[in-house]
Image (cartoon, grey):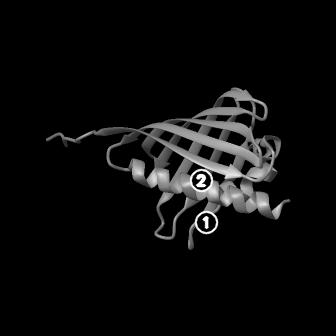
Amino acid sequence: MTEIVDHTVTHSTFVLEHTYPVSPERVFAAWASKQAKTPWFVALPEGASVVEPLDLDFRVGGKERLAVSMADGVEIVYEGCYQDIVSDRRIVATTQMYLNRKPMSVTVATIELTPIEDGTRLVLTEQGAYLDGLDEPKYREAGTRDQLASLARYLKKSS
């Protein structure tokens, strides 16, 4: 007898805004190199560990990859590909995430940086397909919000 699997997909879009008291060039630079991105992007919850460190090729067509193991042993792999980069202003990337080697989501993320009087306004828009109940938009939004807060701490520390 063949096992019947109910494959589901949930589509969702979220937009997050954050202001940073530094120039767009400084915010952009925090995304553009492995050395700068690792401290804030790989901010793991307690008990989690890095299986494969962040690998980053920041250019149009370039890839990035990170694999982590959560405290409960679940492995999460993040893979991205840069589709568009406008220095100091915009980054567009497609991403795929895997949960224990099963596809959990596919997204398009756009990061827009706008100079404001006291720094930079960042607007991150993520459009996603969340697969088979392995990921949910609310979890991705919360995780991305945490990363943007981690970026703020990183920028403050590196000032």
Q: Quadrant of residue 64?
A: top right
| Distance from the alpha carbon under mark 1 to that under mark 2 | 9 Å
Residue 78: x percent and y percent? 57, 46
Q: Residues within 10 Å of mark 2 (few under 14, many from 20)?
A: many
Quadrant of the rendering where the C terminus is positioned:
bottom right
Can you identify the residue that label 2 sits on? 67
Compared across the picture, whether 58 is left or right of 46 comes to right
Horizontal and vertical percent for residue 95? 55, 38
Q: Amino acid at mark 1?
A: Ser
Q: Secondary structure at mark 1?
A: strand
Q: What residue did someone put label 1 on?
A: 49
Most extreme residue toward the bottom is 47
Q: Residue placed at 52% from the left, 56% from the top?
A: 143
Q: Residue 101 vs residue 44: left or right?
A: left
- Mark 2 is on which residue type? Ala
Residue at 56% from the left image edge and 73% from the top image edge = 47
Question: Is the residue 104 above or below the residue 67 in the image?
Answer: above
Farthest-out residue, left: 1
Residue at x 78% of width, y 31% of height = 87
* Residue 58, quarter of picture: top right
Label 1 environment density (alpha carbons within 10 Å; few <14, some 14–19, many ≥20): some
Give the vertical position of 128 relative to 158 (above or below).
Answer: above
- Residue that appears at 52% across and 65% down: 70
Query: Can residue 86 be seen in the rendering of this structure?
Result: yes
The residue at the far front in this view is 117
Quarter of the image that includes the N terminus: top left
Residue 133 rendering spot, x and y as whole percentages: 32, 48
Please indicate whether residue 128 sits to the left or right of residue 46 in the image.
left
Give the secondary structure at mark 2. strand
